[in-house]
Image (cartoon, rainbow, N blue to C red):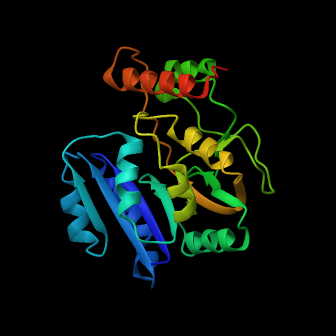
């Protein structure tokens, strides 16, 4: 198997089916697989995907295990030499994933590669970010669903940011195994920053390359309500992250 794409979903049937429809040519290609990890959906997502996309491998979890644990479940089951994590609210043009895989082959010093993410209206999103200090993260939680995904700057050339967001990342199986996988103590955020830090600790590059573009229908998962279950889990993950790296800002 050449490329394995792992998609995580939780009760987002329509978005998931749309994403898989955009991958129809990829799924039909030789040497590719798509694994859908259903993270405890209650809206019939798994059943709908099984009916509409019989070639997609579905792993059903009986509860929401979090982003890192859910993705690890799919990544560990994957058989490809290149592994891609992809949010279910994305739309991927034909050939994009194959081209990103070819880039990894021609740039062996790249540990993680991420594309330019754009909104459905074509505006460029913040596809990479600086260190997610506690001030930044608290501000994001307070802003909640009103937060914008727009990028302040839009590089036109490849660059090496602190981290690339987890909506779309591709890396080799060897890199994933050497990092030990995503830190499952992080239920949601900042598992992507933590993984990129682990990749760089191996002496590999984290690369954003705007030559590749994926549409991302930005879905904020945190909430304005600081005492909600989701916000509490997010804050616990952040505290773990800061203690782990001994860095708060």
Q: Is residue 112 visible?
A: yes
- Residue 207, x across and y down, in percent: 71, 54
Q: Nearer the viewer, residue 44 or 2?
A: 2
Residue at image x 23%, y 45%? 40
Name the image quarter holding residue 221: top left
Across and down, in percent, residue 196 comes to 61, 45
Q: Which residue lies furthest to the bottom in this view?
A: 30
At a point 61% along the width and 52% down the height, the residue shown is 117
Residue 31 position (above or below residue 162): below
**240 relative to 60, above or below:** above
Relative to 211, does residue 70 appear above or below in the rendering?
above
Q: In the rendered view, does 97 fall on the left or right side of 62?
A: right
Pick the quarter of the image with the N terminus: bottom left
Q: Between 216 and 195, which is closer to the camera in this rendering? A: 195
Q: In this view, does 1 lie above or below 130?
A: below
Quarter of the figure with the C terminus: top right
């Amino acid at each position: 198997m050449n490329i394995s794409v792992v998609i995580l979903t939780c009760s987002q049937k329509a978005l998931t089916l749309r994403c898989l429809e955009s991958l129809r040519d990829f799924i039909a290609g030789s040497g590719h697989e798509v694994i859908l990890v259903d993270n405890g959906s209650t809206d019939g997502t798994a059943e709908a995907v099984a009916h509409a996309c019989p070639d997609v491998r579905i792993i059903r979890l009986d509860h929401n295990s979090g982003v890192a644990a859910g993705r690890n479940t799919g990544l560990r089951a994957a058989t490809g030499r290149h592994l891609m994590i992809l949010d279910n609210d994305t739309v991927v043009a034909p050939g994009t994933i194959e081209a990103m895989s070819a880039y990894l082959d021609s740039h062996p010093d790249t540990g993680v590669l991420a594309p330019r993410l754009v909104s459905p209206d074509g505006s460029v999103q913040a596809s990479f970010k600086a260190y997610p200090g506690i001030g930044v993260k608290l501000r994001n939680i307070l802003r909640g669903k009103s937060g914008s995904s727009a990028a302040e700057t839009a590089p036109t050339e490849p660059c090496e940011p602190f981290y690339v967001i987890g909506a779309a990342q591709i890396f080799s199986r060897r890199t994933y195994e050497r990092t030990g996988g995503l830190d499952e103590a992080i239920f949601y955020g900042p598992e992507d920053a933590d993984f990129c830090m682990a990749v760089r600790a191996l002496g590999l590059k984290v690369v954003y390359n705007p030559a590749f573009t994926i549409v991302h229908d930005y879905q904020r998962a945190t909430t304005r309500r600081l005492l909600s279950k989701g916000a509490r889990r997010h804050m616990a993950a952040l505290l773990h992250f800061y203690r782990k790296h001994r860095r708060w800002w």
